[in-house]
């Protein structure tokens, strides 16, 4: 490669372009015009346009002559799949030019990354010469030089604390295998409807959706592994071959919601994937050796740092190439029955690990999850929206905005935090362009406002954003966060929220199993006293069996897929009845506290047999924990120690040592941190679904798939139950006042929570009658029995449409009285 150097005239033209924009626009509008050009953009003439927003450097008075682009170009092929290697790079510094708060350079001589080769790595550096930049964390700085990573990077193969990679995103888009999928999007395509925005197509909602955590979904824990799984399934479907029980858990949906695939924070003490061996930064150019490693952070995906949000998380890329994300999407789009992809966009906060990566202007101050972002700062606002656009342009069909209620700003005049609904509207207004097609994605918000206000569960309508954006969807109250169907009386006490799903849930995501609800379910301490939470004894003989049956439950699956409106969503780990918990090894400060809060994971998710299995928990066993009981007692004591010492690790170690532990004495804070790291790594391996493939039950997975197929054969079920006083914006209930549709529960319960309901197809050619024992003692059900609950219910002509395992009824047979035990459900159908 030639030596990287600045092209003076094109760079000067870039500065003039920026100045003209800022002269003609207000600050936010100007930033919106400029933000798409930030980062590194390869051009057709072989140059790369590089732009950085640098308010801290400018405010500190760092001269333009002391600011450079530092470029690292590999001298030979680099194996990005290797756990660790030493790589030779040619390092060069290139003078950058300044206009206002921005630095620009049109650079020639940078290598552009492809699927086959690592591109030049780059970062902004400035000579400090003893000068400090106020408000900026200098922990990344080195040898008297300040280091500024690129917040809008397309690829970060060695993590966000290493230089970004110059990558050919245009090539990636041109070569994607699902171009025809996007080229076919149009107003006459059944997958889309015409949006209110310039007539662009908007991707229609899914019929049902599966939430997937890429890090535990397959043995490899990678996007490539997920792509291979769906490619293999597609080949079987095309050949009309039967799927295995485990494969069935992946299908029957027309959408997948990926948990966040953004780059993550890292544990300073554990993760170092970019380590110069010998480095003279004062030299303008030299050859350097750098130890690099494939990032292997463990995380559920939400501990993001904003920097490089536009790039895929390298910890779930087995090849280190952004192509993996496109390949996975294409594998789903090109199935015989295509599956939409929904990205979980978590731009509502930043982990504290973002502080050394971003200008102080990005932060309003500490928040619930680390740092609260300053959405009111015009350039920050524009950059965040640009990051969303770039990430979605990987080819997502839909966007789920994580924690929309957390997009707030402080209003000093009112002395309170205000929901930034204008920013959420700007998120909604962004359009995507993939394979030459511009479109608007399916829009989903998770918004439980006024959460975390004390009365949030009672006060939240879960409809605030649907009312503002009639095309949008929200997570339902039964889906939102803290649902515990493994406990007795859940379905009785949650009835009022379930009923709301029937009344106006057509634009809600529904279901009980997701990454948050299963995690929260494992944090409940059940007890024997009358006032302690009690598990439902009908679901299983042990707590792990109870939890598995609660989140993969025939009655609740049929409730949401066969009766209620909205878009049902399942969680892959729950489908597999595999373990799940709060997994992350990216926090060196709070990790022990996080583990302590997971103390009841041992009760809910871990069996004696599993702990004794040599495949599981090797690190904890090496620390001295030989039995599940020892581990259980220690984490319970750890939880108590956190509370007793206000999370003072030294005091916690002394307290635990005085009580005696399986770990060697003397116990120190370092030992507690080692325990936390071992816990997270072992739980992460334990939760990998490849371990649970052979335990999938053929009858159960066949039934689960039949439930999802039932929904897809009747997409009209998405509409609200007729007779609701509220109705929806697009289908007012007043249009169906003559309908017999209903949804209710039998009261008094008399020991059984029996849900029942009637649905009618819009064409009037099918009626469905639903009954489910959500929890409690066995109960009889039949059309004749339900006629006592549903006025004017016809009792003739019913036949079995679908019955849960264990219910003595066969599909197609005439309706008869059946006994429904806890979790038993049935749907009859008739043609009026």
Image (spheres, grey):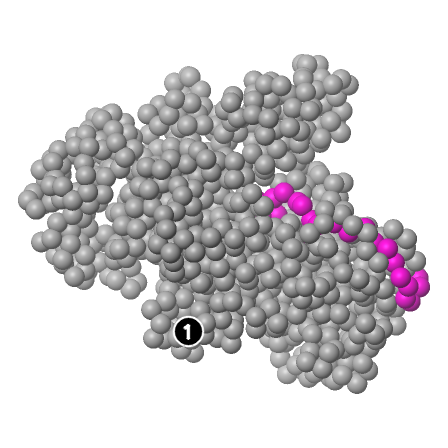
Q: Is residue 257 above or below residue 776?
A: below
Q: Residue at x 37, y 45 (%)?
A: 511
Q: Residue at x 82, y 82 (%)?
A: 8
Residue 436 appears in the figure: yes
Q: Position of residue 321 (x, y in %)?
A: 64, 59
Quadrant of the image occupied by residue 411: bottom right
Magenta stretch: dominant secondary structure: loop
On the picture, is 379 further left or further right than 100?
A: left
Query: Which residue is at the front of the view, 315 or 479?
Result: 315
Residue 75 part of the magenta-drawn span: no
Residue at the spot of label 1: 184
On the picture, is 481 further left or further right than 671?
A: left
Q: Is residue 242 above or below residue 591?
A: below
Q: Which residues are magenta?
A: 282-305
Query: Which residue is at the front of the view, 429 or 572?
Result: 572
Q: Position of residue 109 (x, y in %)?
A: 80, 74
Query: Which residue is at the front of the view, 347 or 223?
Result: 223
Query: Which residue is at the front of the view, 796 or 379?
Result: 796
Q: Residue at x 67, y 37 (%)?
A: 590
Residue 291 part of the magenta-drawn span: yes
């Amino acid at each position: 490669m030639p030596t990287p150097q600045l092209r003076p005239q094109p760079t000067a033209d870039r500065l003039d372009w920026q100045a003209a924009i800022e002269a003609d626009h207000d600050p936010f509008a100007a930033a919106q015009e400029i933000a798409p050009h930030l980062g590194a953009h390869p051009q057709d003439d072989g140059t790369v346009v590089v732009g950085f927003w640098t308010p801290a450097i400018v405010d500190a008075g760092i001269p333009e002559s002391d600011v450079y682009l530092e470029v690292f170009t590999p001298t030979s092929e680099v194996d990005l799949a290797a756990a660790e290697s030493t790589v030779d790079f040619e390092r060069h510094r290139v003078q950058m030019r300044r206009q206002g708060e921005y630095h620009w350079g049109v650079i020639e001589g940078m290598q552009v990354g492809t699927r086959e080769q690592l591109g030049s790595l780059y970062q902004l550096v400035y000579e400090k010469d003893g000068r400090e930049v106020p408000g900026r964390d200098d922990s990344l700085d080195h040898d008297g030089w300040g280091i500024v990573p690129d917040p809008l990077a397309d690829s970060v193969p060695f993590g966000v604390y290493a230089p970004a990679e110059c990558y050919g995103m245009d090539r990636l888009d041109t070569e994607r295998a699902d171009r025809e999928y996007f080229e076919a999007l149009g107003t006459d395509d059944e997958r889309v409807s015409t949006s209110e925005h310039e007539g662009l197509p908007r991707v229609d909602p899914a019929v049902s959706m599966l939430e997937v955590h890429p890090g535990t979904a397959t043995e490899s824990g990678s996007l490539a592994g997920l792509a291979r799984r769906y490619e293999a399934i597609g080949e079987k479907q095309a050949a009309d071959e039967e799927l295995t029980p485990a494969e069935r858990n992946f299908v029957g949906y027309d959408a997948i919601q990926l948990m966040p695939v953004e780059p993550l924070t890292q544990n300073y003490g554990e993760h170092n994937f970019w380590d110069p061996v010998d480095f003279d930064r004062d030299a303008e150019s030299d050859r350097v050796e750098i130890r690099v490693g494939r990032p292997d952070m463990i995380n559920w995906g939400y501990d993001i740092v904003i920097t490089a949000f536009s790039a895929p998380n390298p910890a779930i890329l087995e090849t280190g190439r952004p192509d993996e994300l496109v390949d996975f999407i294409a594998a789903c789009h090109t199935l015989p029955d295509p599956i939409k992809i929904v990205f979980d966009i978590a731009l509502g906060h930043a982990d504290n690990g973002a502080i050394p990566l971003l200008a102080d202007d990005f932060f309003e101050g500490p928040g619930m999850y680390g740092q609260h972002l300053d959405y009111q700062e015009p350039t920050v606002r524009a950059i965040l929206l640009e990051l969303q656009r770039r990430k979605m342009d990987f080819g997502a069909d839909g966007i789920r905005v994580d924690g929309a209620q957390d997009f707030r700003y402080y209003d000093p005049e009112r002395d309170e935090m205000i929901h930034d609904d204008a920013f959420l509207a700007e998120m909604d207004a962004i359009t995507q362009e993939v394979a030459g097609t511009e479109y608007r994605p399916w829009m989903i918000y998770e918004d439980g406002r006024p959460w975390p206000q004390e009365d949030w569960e009672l006060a939240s309508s879960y409809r605030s954003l649907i009312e503002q954006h009639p095309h949008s969807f929200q997570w339902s109250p039964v889906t939102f966060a803290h649902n515990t169907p493994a406990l007795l009386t859940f379905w009785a006490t949650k009835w009022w929220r379930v009923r709301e799903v029937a009344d106006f849930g057509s634009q809600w995501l529904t279901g009980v199993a997701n990454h948050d609800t299963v995690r929260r379910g494992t944090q409940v301490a059940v007890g024997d006293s009358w006032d302690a939470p009690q598990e439902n004894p009908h679901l299983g003989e042990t707590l792990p069996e109870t939890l598995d049956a609660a989140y993969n439950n025939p009655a609740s699956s049929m409730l949401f897929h066969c009766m209620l409106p909205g878009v049902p969503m399942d969680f892959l780990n729950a489908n597999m009845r595999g373990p799940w918990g709060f997994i992350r090894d990216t926090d060196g400060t709070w990790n022990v506290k996080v583990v302590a809060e997971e103390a009841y994971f041992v009760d809910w998710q871990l069996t004696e047999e599993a702990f004794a299995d040599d495949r599981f928990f090797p690190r904890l066993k090496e620390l001295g924990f030989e039995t599940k009981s020892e581990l259980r007692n220690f984490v319970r004591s750890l939880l108590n120690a956190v509370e007793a010492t206000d999370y003072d690790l030294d005091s916690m170690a002394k307290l635990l040592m005085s009580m005696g532990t399986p770990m060697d004495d003397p116990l120190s804070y370092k030992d507690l941190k080692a325990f936390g790291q071992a816990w997270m790594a072992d739980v992460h391996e334990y939760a990998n679904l490849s371990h649970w493939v052979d335990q999938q039950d053929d009858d159960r997975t066949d039934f689960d798939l039949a439930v999802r197929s039932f929904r897809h054969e009747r997409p009209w079920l998405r509409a609200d139950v007729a007779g609701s006083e509220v109705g929806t914006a697009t289908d007012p209930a007043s249009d169906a006042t003559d309908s017999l549709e209903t949804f209710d529960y039998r009261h008094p319960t008399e020991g059984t929570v029996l849900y029942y309901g009637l649905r009618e197809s819009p064409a009037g050619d099918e009626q469905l009658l639903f009954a489910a024992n959500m929890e409690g003692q066995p109960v009889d059900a039949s059309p004749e029995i339900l006629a006592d609950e549903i006025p004017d219910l016809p009792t003739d002509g019913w036949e079995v449409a679908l019955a849960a395992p264990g219910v003595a009824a066969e599909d197609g047979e005439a309706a008869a009285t059946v006994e429904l035990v806890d979790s038993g459900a049935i749907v009859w159908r008739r043609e009026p």
